[in-house]
Amino acid sequence: MAPIPNPELFRRLPAVDELLRTIGVTALVAEHGWVGVIEAIRAELEGLRAKISSGALDRAELEQALSKLPELLATRLDLATACSLRRVINASGVVIHTNLGRAPLSPDALAHIAEFATGYSNLEFDLEKGERGNRDEHAHHLLAQLFAREKIHDKSSLVVNNNAAAVLLALSALAHGGEVIISRGELVEIGGSFRIPEIMAQSGAVLREVGTTNRTRIDDYRSAISERTRLLFRVHRSNFEIVGFTEQPSLAELAELGREHDLPLVEDLGSGALVDLEAYGITDEPSVYASLRGGASLVTFSGDKLMGGPQAGVIAGDPSIVERLRKHPLFRAVRVDKMCYAALEATLRAYLREQYDRIPLLHLLRLPSAEVRRRCEALAASVSRLSASVQPTRTLIGGGAAPGRSLPSFALSLEGGLSAADLARRLRQQEIPIVARIEGERVLLDLRTVDPKDDCYLGETLRIIAADY
């Protein structure tokens, strides 16, 4: 038989107005506002009523619960208003980790954002003329200088919110209602189930596949050209490789074919390297400069991948074509704000000054393996209660960049006490979550992708977890 609730206990529950006048709750109102506190009070009181109804509370337990009510309200309000976006420590060994925010921004970029985001700026104001200006100029003048250093002149640029938007805008402005020729082997899925054929369909362009998955020749493109053709489209296979019996026309061949038929050649580079990555041990990753020199009419790439800047889609190429994109109605829907431009400016300025180590992504790629190993050994020595060892590993570039490419690195390998899955979960549950990876029955913490300032926190966290074994 279900317990009979004590009516006296219901009468001891305070009214909402009464609680709002108590000192502890008044302080919560000042911090969280009336509406939030009232909602929290009603939720706590409803919980107490439910426990009384079920017979789960006697008088003494109710009095104790009521005495802790301000504390319970504070906890509820903190949880309700807590930010879900949190800093994490990336020990996964993936440098450009899409799920963890891709490239970390530089302190210079953060300072530039803070300078302009907290007040007004000349985002779209020409200070010389005292009239409306063009927001694109803030990135364009820096990109133009970078291009000029590479003997690439007379190129314009445009910035949108990501590379998928850049591709969508280019196809919408240049090929709506017409055909776009692309190799079957380049119909990629670019992450999050966004596929090139679907983006092309959304733009109003008609997909015209040529060649086969592994082999496409220049004659395949030539044979497909008709009066309905609007552009040639080349997509860099940024997140997979095709090896073996393969063939594809060079960029120069496609550019020449485009010129013969007065068709623009658009190349979706995806990653967008602005330095020679061979110096970082990464081969066969095309640069933005190489694409523009090779004859691409328009190049699109990401700002937060190999460039190491904010999330953005950068479009560069023939000024007349870029102007067509700028005038398209879709551009206003996908353009970026002042914070993105501020971060982009700071990042591009570091490239102009050749201060590559001031760009965190490039610093991580250049980090000597010996330095990573030294830090792993120091951390292993500090957590003696765990079965910790230093293990050679490979750090992935990630983020749909440099497919199949990795860098030599070292990781702290952990085993024992908890299962690998449980230990990885415990690491993610910390105040600053730690994201590791699991190989076999061991948890690996690749320190190449961890800021050295976080090593002490890692060590302290591992010691606390070990003490619970």
Image (spheres, grey):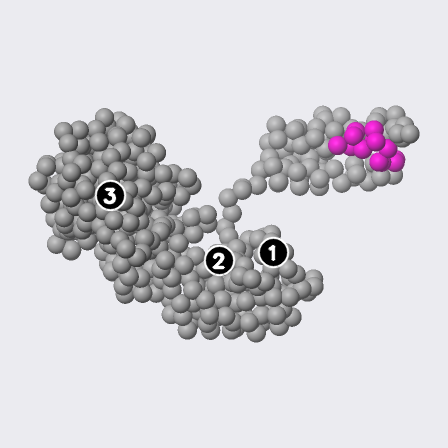
For residue 210, say whether it is visible: yes
| Viewer-side label of 2, 3 | 3
Q: Position of residue 233 (x, y in %)?
A: 22, 40
The answer to which quarter of the image holds residue 115 is top left
For this view, does 260 lie left or right of residue 325? left
State the separation of the CA atoms marked 2 and 3.
38 Å
Q: Give the label on residue 92, or none.
A: 2
Compare marks 2 and 1 and give the one earlier in the sequence.
Answer: 2
**Nearer-N-terminus badge (3/1):** 3
The x and y percentages for residue 347 are 30, 52
Q: Nearer the viewer, mark 3 or mark 1?
A: 3
Q: Secondary structure at mark 2?
A: loop
Q: Distance between the Cα atoms at labels 2 and 1?
A: 14 Å
Mark on residue 156? Answer: none
**Residue 42: horizontal and vertical position, in percent?**
70, 28
- The crowding category of the residue bearing disc 1, from other C-alpha atoms within 10 Å (few below 14, some 14 to 19, many at least 20), is some
Q: Which residue is mark 3?
A: 211
Looking at the rendered image, the quarter that the N terminus falls into is: top right
Type of amino acid at the residue the image marks with label 2: Ser
Secondary structure predominantly adopted by residues drawn in magenta: helix
Distance from disc 3 to disc 1, alpha carbons, whole Å, reads: 45 Å
As for residue 216 lying within the magenta part, the answer is: no
Residue drawn at (17%, 32%) of the image: 229
Residue visible at 74% across and 37% down in the picture: 69
Confirm or deny contact between disc 2 and disc 3 (CB under 8 A).
no
Residue range of the region highlighted in magenta in the rendering: 47-59
Tell which circle, 2 or 3, labels the residue nearer the N-terminal end.
2
Please name the amino acid that badge 3 sits on: Gly
Q: Which residue is mark 1?
A: 421
Q: Secondary structure at mark 1?
A: helix
How crowded pointer 3 is (Cα within 10 Å; few <14, some 14-19, many 20+) is rated as some
| Residue 341 in the image: above or below residue 55 | below
